Amino acid sequence: ARKIIIDTDPGQDDAVAILLALASPELEVLGLTAVAGNVPLALTELNARKILELAGRPDIPVFAGCDRPLSRPLITAEHVHGKSGLDGIDLPEPQIGLHLRHAVDFIVETLRREPAGTVTLVPIGPLTNIAQAFRQAPDIVARVQEIVLMGGAYFEVGNITPAAEFNIFVDPEAAAEVFAAGAPLVVMPLDVTHEALTSRDWIDGMRALPGRCGPAIASWTDFFERFDKEKYGSEGAPLHDPCTIAWLLRPDLFTGRHINVEIETEGRFTAGMTVADWWRVTDRPANANFIRHVDRDALFTLLADRLARLP
Ligand code: BDR
Ligand code: CA
């Protein structure tokens, strides 16, 4: 199985991404590393443990990472995810404990321990932990198999400012360092994740699953949907973060281009923008596989099939 570390700020869509990975035998989740993002770190690491408990996977370690961006104050998104970060269903206090090691140390040690080119990083929150790990141990960059992240937007523009997507906007300096690091990069921007919209039928299908995970997923997506409905008038909730895991399972469902993507860190109106050279109008070298479209029906069939395997 392909070894992955999920770096996350759960987040209802983060929860679905994590559950999708746990339901997929092609992937081995080495650990969850929590980062501050949608809500503060104390809640994201707690939510990560609640999700593992729900899935019956106390064997997977959870580590807390950076509690704020590299050089800015933290911006959170309770307006999207609710006060807990995981509103929609109340999960019990988890029995699963938090590991004492810092998430950044876990990332560094894991990449040094495992054979080079065998560990994939899946960041689905702000990129603070990953950038910090690369700063602390530049030698690990060349050992990363691939980074498959959710973040950015180009044609769909922003969801937190007119120009920027939340994960990149929260810590643009971290994003700039990760995009420039040189590790193979796959990027799921809003351009594709806004195609990954849940349907009523799909949510009803989740709610009808016999286990406990299906109904939780339905409640989370219902909660998540209400925001997009009010804000964008769209039916359905965008499953941003699960696109990363889906790509690891079925890259053939996605299309994009290998292009240069730069992160704006200074713009007066555009800080956190992912400036994607889609038409290759510069000679800056390609550094990312920037995904633009997904086969929506096939994606949701995959999700339904996998999530139905959970307890
Ligand atoms: C991203 O921001 C968070 O709110 C979601 O979990 C996702 O990772 C979408 O912009
Ligand atoms: Ca997230």
Image (spheres, rainbow, N blue to C red):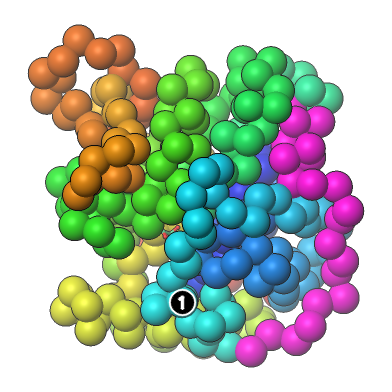
Left or right: where 119 falls relative to 82: right
Residue 72 drawn above or below residue 12: above
The residue depicted at 17 percent of the width and 29 percent of the height is 278
Please provide percent x and percent y for residue 298: 34, 55
Give the crowd class for mark 1: few <14, some 14-19, many >=20 residues within 10 Å. some
The residue depicted at 87 percent of the width and 76 percent of the height is 95
Left or right: where 150 falls relative to 280: right
Please provide percent x and percent y for residue 66: 66, 50
- Magenta highlight range: 90-111
The residue depicted at 85 percent of the width and 69 percent of the height is 96
Residue 177 drawn above or below residue 172: above
Left or right: where 60 falls relative to 309: right
Q: Quadrant of residue 266?
A: top left
Q: Quadrant of ligand 1?
A: bottom left
Q: Quadrant of residue 256?
A: top left
Asked whether residue 143 appears in the rendered view, the answer is no
Looking at the rendered image, the quarter that the N terminus falls into is top right
Residue 9 drawn above or below residue 171: below
Q: Quadrant of residue 140?
A: top right
Q: Amino acid at mark 1?
A: Glu
Pick the residue in front: 117 or 136: 136
Please provide percent x and percent y for residue 132: 63, 35
Please provide percent x and percent y for residue 2: 66, 35
Looking at the rendered image, the quarter that the C terminus falls into is bottom right
Pick the residue in front: 78 or 30: 78
The residue depicted at 74 percent of the width and 55 percent of the height is 64
Q: Which residue is mark 1?
A: 78
Asked whether residue 106 appears in the rendered view, the answer is yes
Pick the residue in front: 79 or 48: 79
Q: Please say whether residue 96 is one of the residues in the magenta stretch.
A: yes
Q: Secondary structure at mark 1?
A: helix
Residue 81 drawn above or below residue 5: below
